[in-house]
Amino acid sequence: MTPPPPGPEPSPADATGDGRDAAGEALAGARWVEARDGFAALLRVDATDAEAWNGVATAQWWLDDGPSCLAARESAYRAAREAGDLRSAATAAATLGYDAALFGQGSAVALGWLGRARALLDGLPEAGPEHGWLAMREAELALQVTHRPDVAHRAAREAVDLGHALGRADLAVVGEGLLGLDDVLRGGLQAGMQRLDAAVAAALTGELPDLMWAGKVCCWLVVACRQAQDLPRALEWCERVDALCREHDLAPLLTACRIHHASVRLASGHWIDAERELVAAIERMHGSRRATRTDAVVQLAHLRRRQGRLDEADALYAQAGYAAQALVGRALVHLERGEASAAWTLAADVLDDVPVDDRLARGTVLLPVVRCAVAVGDAGAAGAARDELMGIAEGVGTDALRAAAAAARALVAGGPNRDPRGARAAWRAAARAFHRAGLPVDEAEARLALARLLGDEPLAAEMEVQAAVATLEEVEAPERLAAARDVLAAPRRRDPGSLTTRELEVLRLVAEGRSTGQIAASLVLSEHTVHRHVANILTRLGEPTRAAAVAHAARAGIL
């Protein structure tokens, strides 16, 4: 058993109910250091006090001290086992299951602890609340770590049913909240949001006395809004959860909320604000092993990639390991560098790893898959990914997914089996849907893509570029605004002779199969500058990809 935490010598009151009551009141009042020290004093009197070990573990959880939290929780488990209190031991093991995953010990360790909890409870004559909370831990792990939505749904339903049978409203509310998140991730937005709304209302009106579960239910709603790209609602709930966290000093949940808030700001084009929040969150979580830090790193990597800072983006994605969004991001970095084959290899592998019934997660990776498949000329794979994305968009019905599906149609139409008219119509549809979804940078990029296809209609092309510039002037995406203004200042003719000397140098190196990084090194430029030259080349030639631009210039005899 872990030695009792250090601290001052306990007073006689610490060994009585007075000390325990004071520590419990501190815990309920979110005075985490006071609670930790109060329970530690009890343990220096009796190191086998399972309740006190649990109190220390809970306080350390909120103080984001993962190793100390896990060590105290293990001591609580052992103390309860030695005392023959199987229900308390199972509760400690179930909590350890989730915390082991949260603090980076991996899914195998987490599943092992949940298995111990289940074995202890299966031998009891009747089900109690402990069975329901174990089911909730199993549901959380299945939904967020092992990505088994079928297991998550079954376990959350068990928790809800037990909550009703035992008269435990808190258990039923939490179970309904997770069922709502599961519904949303499967694409059932209306039913899922209704469940989450009801659960959050209960949490905010005091039906969940445990602050951890109250905070989690609120965070699930934010995650659902974020996944569905319902940006106004996500922002509203970020602010409400932020207030709850500040009121009760819920630092880990506050940090998670700020990361969600930053991701919403990033999507809505407020890049400067998003960058400030993400950098601050990563600094606050220095040394933390919580999964929320990985989310912050991935979001900052997305920002760096869209800023054209590819080396920084790649390094950040590497920190995030095998997270699906990190791997997709790395694929897009390869694509930006002109490394189409490497991009396609990564994107195809990620698609294989995302469960088919996790429809919103599939929806976020299918458009990058289409981009990469088009870049390598795999029309079959691109068409299959496009069709799946269109099906998800039709079933889920959000403007963000409709926009992504339209962009996928445009990319495929502009690929090997060229359909210029279809591509133009699809990019127009994408721009409109991105506008309705509140995704201005994506809207501007769709307009610029459309302008590239209007090389024979210079006035129409210029109108689209002007609209893109106007859209970007309303937000905080300076790198994208500068690139759009470059396009506006450049001549827009399909004649390869209109390329500048530097653009011809870049295009010749692209034709040799050089990546963005290799071109940058050869011409002593930054990768960001090379990327802008390539974008200008595509616009001037009215071509959607590097390969198409090379073929265009070759036909014109300038390569």
Image (cartoon, rainbow, N blue to C red):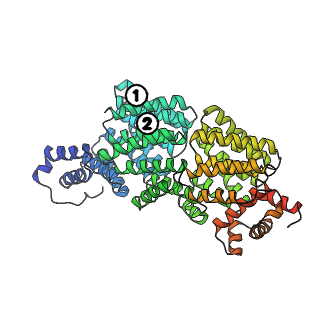
Residue at coordinates 53% horizontally, 39% vertically from top-left?
230
Question: Where is 192 relative to 363, above or below?
Answer: above
**What residue did someone put label 2 on?**
135
> Residue 422: x percent and y percent?
78, 41
Q: Position of residue 201 (x, y in %)?
A: 38, 31
Q: Is residue 14 left or right of residue 91?
A: left
Q: Residue furthest left?
A: 12
Q: Are marks 2 and 1 in contact (CB under 8 Å)?
A: yes
Disc 2 residue type? Answer: Ala
Task: Give the quarter of the figure containing the N terminus.
Answer: bottom left
Query: Which labelled disc corresponds to residue 162?
Result: 1
Give whichever of 251, 271 is nearer the camera: 271
How far across and down, in percent of the image, does residue 135 sit? 43, 36
Residue positioned 73% across, 41% down in the render: 426
C-alpha distance separating marks 2 and 1: 10 Å
Say if residue 128 shows up in the picture: no
Nearer the N terminus, badge 2 or badge 1? 2
Quarter in which the C terminus is drawn: bottom right
Residue drawn at x 59%, y 43% as measured from the top left: 361
Q: Residues within 10 Å of mark 1 (few under 14, many from 20)?
A: many
